[in-house]
Structure formats: structure tokens, C-alpha cells
Amino acid sequence: MIEKLAAYLSYPFVRYALIVGVLISLCSAMLGVVLVLKRFSFIGDGLSHVAFGAIAVAAVLGLSNRMLVVLPVTVVSAVLLLRTGQNAKIKGDAAIAMLSVGALAFGYLLMHLFSTSANISGDVCSTLFGSTSILTLTKREVWLCVILSLAVIAVFILFYGRIFAVTFDEDFARATGIRTKRYQLLIAVTIAVIVVLAMNLVGSLLISALVIFPALSAMRLFKSFRSVTVCAAVLSVVCATLGILISILAGTPVGSTVVAVDAAAFGLCCLIRVSRG
Amino acid sequence: MSLIKVTELSCGYEREPVISGLTFKVDRGDYLCIVGENGSGKTTLMKTLLGLIPPLSGTIETGDGLTRTGIGYLPQRTAVQQDFPASCAEIVRSGFQGRKKPFSFLTKEEKQQADAVMDRLGIRNLAGKCFRELSGGQMQRVLLARALCATETLLLLDEPVAGLDPDAAKEMYAAVSTLHKEGIAVIMITHDIDAALQYATHILHVGETVFFDTKACYATHPGKPEPAEKKEVLS
Ligand SMILES: Nc1ncnc2c1ncn2[C@@H]1O[C@H](COP(=O)(O)OP(=O)(O)O)[C@@H](O)[C@H]1O
Ligand SMILES: [Mg+2]
């Protein structure tokens, strides 16, 4: 089996998949802790559907670089969703549900009506579940992904203190002079970037899993914000690597294999917690 | 110049005033207790003082070296997430954030200062503990320590003893009183008129009757709640 693995690793597309997988899972887990604690995890879900709609539009327009459409649309939606989520008058959750299913339906409709591809359901399926796309990444996509992920990680480390303060107690943070709106914006933009990146790895329907599972697993085991964040990041990277390798060896779809490993890790963490009493 | 001078202030949500026509000031060395029934707008007033909600009319001026960001705040208990995974040290240290530049990491001095604050409140042994596993009284002390990291001048406390058992409440009052004697001005919301009369230098009563004066004058004022009413407030 080791030999088989070594043989696969000699292919550049497998190495690309691993690099991208590790970076994306690292970013999504770090931000995931913030999203879960701020009760924002639904936003990741809504955004992934919006990104699906945007991809459909980009595909219909025949754009070669889909990121140019998908990234800005998702960023703008993230900002709008965070705004409405805070507004008590508009039901935030209903607005998000509406937007996300709307984008999903609209995206599929567009693909169906205008797509030139012979295999529409195959296209849709791979956009939703990311079935094979991570193994077909081009060098340019890998670079874009590396740069964006490093930017997300840098933002998180540089603003770590602020992010903790705003996540733990927004009122206190604002009362002591932190411009919390800015950090919300920062968080929203970062989530959008992660969602767009993560579509490459797991497809749009499974992104939430990548964001939520590692954070929840880490919260079963650790008690300080820093250890939860570090544990979530490590766990997520390990699960993504394992998932990608398993999917290559067993020929299973990448995205769902990674998520299955994440879910298994969550179950394990729950067991450890129960056994600790 | 006072630390805070409030003139003809109206505050509330969505243009609907909860409190109006309020005038008072807080100087260095003052200990102001805000009393009044549930829903009379005490929390609303405190949030307006902190700049969390905009005043509907009137002015809030700060002076005597106090800036709007130099205030320490202990929120009403329900406002803080009780299930958050964070160590007490992390929470106390987060009190410094408002005074720091965005990119900067915590310095060694600030960490020592945070330790000193925890010593001062007798919670140094809790530093590595998880916040959500503490008792109510310990949680309030940790949040008080965080507030102390944000200020040396003025503390705003929103019902710091609500939900605490009598012993923990007594300890909390004692801790705040010590800080006041060490030179920090205090504005505290409380339901407990006895404690207000015992510790405060000034009393602000909000509700049907609005009253602001020194403690001595409060005792003789008609706005003072009758004992029966007081019981109702406490229950
Ligand atoms: N976020 C809010 N939006 C609108 N009205 C509010 C909000 N919070 C409190 N209120 C109303 O403002 C009034 C004063 O509330 P509050 O300041 O919390 O009272 P207290 O702290 O004295 O018990 C209450 O009638 C309450 O219903
Ligand atoms: Mg209140």
C-alpha cells in the first residue's frame, strides 16, 4: 500500500491536491472556531450555496477564470448576510435560507438552460460535492489558493487578540474602543474567501462540514480559546490529509471522504470526552 | 472638570425614550449607585454612557483625563456567553485590547499587569481554569478583572451581584469598595438599596421619579422607595 501511495505521490496533481487540502482545511478550521462561537456557522452554509449560483453564472458566461465572478459575489453576500443576521427586525435565518436555496435553484436552472456541456448532471454533481475537481487543479489555481490561504492565516494570527475579544464579548470590546464592525467585516470577507477556496476541495454542499466539525471536535476536548483553535487546525489538517489519501487509494470522491473522516474524528472526540467523565 | 458629565440626556431604542431629561455628573472619587425597578432603563443608560447605543438627545461629556475608551465595563450577566471555551487568563488579558494597536501582541508588562490584577481580586489561582466551569461569583470576579485591565479611572458595573448567593455578593461588594478606596470611580447598577446606601457616595434613581444627589440627601427625598416597594424590587 505504501508503494502504491508513493507511486501516486509522484504525480503532481496528487501533490497539488494535498497542498491545497492542507491549506484549506487549516483556514476553515481556524475561522470555524470563531463562526461556531459567534453562532455564525449558518452563514458558511448560506454562502456556499451563493457560491454555487455564482459558479453557474460564470459557467454560463463562459468565463475561463471563474474566481473573478465567484469571489466578489461571495464576499458581497457575506457582508450582506452578516448585516441582516444582526438586524433583529429581519429574520436573519429566514433571509439566509431564502438566499441560499434561491441561489441553488437559480444556479441549477441556469446550468440546465445554457450549459454547453454534454454532461450537465455530472457538472452539477461535481460543483455540489467536489467529486473530482481537486485532482484536476491547474498550477495557477494552486498558486491562487496558496496565496489566499496564507493571507487568511496571516490575518488570523495578526488580529488574534482582537478576534478573541470581539468573539467573546462584542459589547465589552466596543465599549473599550475596538471598532467591532471592522472586525465583523474582516470575518465576513475571510469566510467568503474560505468558502470559495473550499469549493475546490469538498464542493459547495459540504463546506459547512469542513468549517464546523473540527471546531466542535476541539471544543469537546479543550477549554481555552487558544488550545481549541490549535486543536481544531491540527485535527482538520490531519483529517483532510487522511481523507485525500484514502480517497486516492480507495477511489472514493474526495470531498465526501474528507467529511466522513472529519465526522469520525468528531465521534472519537465525543467518546474521549464521555470516557473522561 | 468631571470624569463624566451628562446633560439633559434621553436614551432608549429606536427613538423611543426609556429615560429622558437626565442630568448628573461623576467626579474622581465618586461611587454612584444607579437604582430603579426592573425595566426602568438602567442598563439602557449604562450602554448609552459606554457609547453602545447613541443618545436620543442631550450630551455626554468626558473629561479629567478620561476618554471614551478608558472605561472598564462589567456587563449584566446574561450578556456574556456562559459556554465559551476560554481560560480566565485569556479573558482577563482581553481587557487590554481596546488600548492596543491592532497588530500588536500582548507585552510581558501587560501579562504581569494582568497577573497583578488577578492577585488584587484573589483569583490568580483561577488563571488557567476554564471560564464556563467557574461559580457565578468567580465569573463575576474574572469579568471585573478584565474591566480593570481596561481602566484605571472609571468602572461601570451592571448588576454585579445579580444571581450570586449572599456570601459571594458580599465579597463582590467588598472587592468593588476596595477598588473605590484605591482611587477608581465607580458607577454601579444594583437592586440592593441597602448596599447602595452603605457603599455609594451618590445615588441616581431612575424610573417614575428621577433623582440624583449625594447619599445623605437621598435618604430624605420623597423619591426614595418605601420599604414595601423595596421588597418587591428585591424579589
Ligand atoms: N435591545 C432592545 N431593543 C428595544 N428595547 C429594549 C432593548 N433592550 C431593552 N429594551 C427595553 O428598554 C427598557 C429598559 O430596559 P433595561 O435598560 O434593560 O432595564 P433595566 O436594566 O433597568 O432592568 C425595557 O422596557 C426593555 O423592554
Ligand atoms: Mg438591566
Image (tube, rainbow, N blue to C red):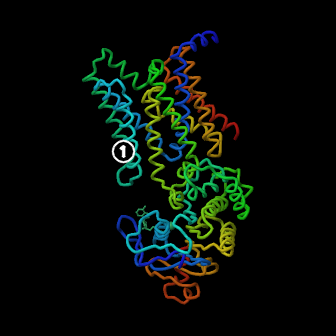
Q: Residue at x 53, y 46 (%)?
A: A37
Spot occupied by residue B149 in the image (x, y as percentages of width and height) = 63, 61
Q: Given the current orientation, which residue lies at the most extreme bottom position?
A: B220
Please determine whether, in this image, residue A100 is positioned above or below residue B216: above
* Camera sees residue A131: no
Front in this rendered view, residue B209 or A109: A109
Please determine whether, in this image, residue B13 is positioned above or below residue A256: below
Q: Residue at x 52, y 43 (%)?
A: A36
Q: Would residue B118 be found to the left or right of residue A31 on screen?
A: right
Looking at mark 1, is its residue's CB closer than 8 Å to ligand 1? no
Q: Residue at x 40, y 22 (%)?
A: A126
Mark 1 neighbour class, 10 Å CA radius: few under 14, some 14 to 19, many 20 or more: few
Front in this rendered view, residue A258 or B181: B181
Q: Which residue is mark 1?
A: A94
Please determine whether, in this image, residue A206 is positioned above or below residue B66: above
Q: Amino acid at mark 1?
A: Ala
Q: Quadrant of the C terminus of chain B?
A: bottom right
Spot occupied by residue A178 in the image (x, y as percentages of width and height) = 51, 56
* Camera sees residue B75: yes
Please determine whether, in this image, residue B126 is positioned above or below residue B188: above
Q: Secondary structure at mark 1?
A: helix
Q: Would residue A121 be found to the left or right of residue A259 on screen?
A: left
Front in this rendered view, residue A245 or A223: A245
Q: How many marks?
A: 1
Spot occupied by residue A239 in the image (x, y as percentages of width and height) = 58, 27
Q: Residue at x 53, y 57 (%)?
A: A173
Chain letter behind tag 1:
A
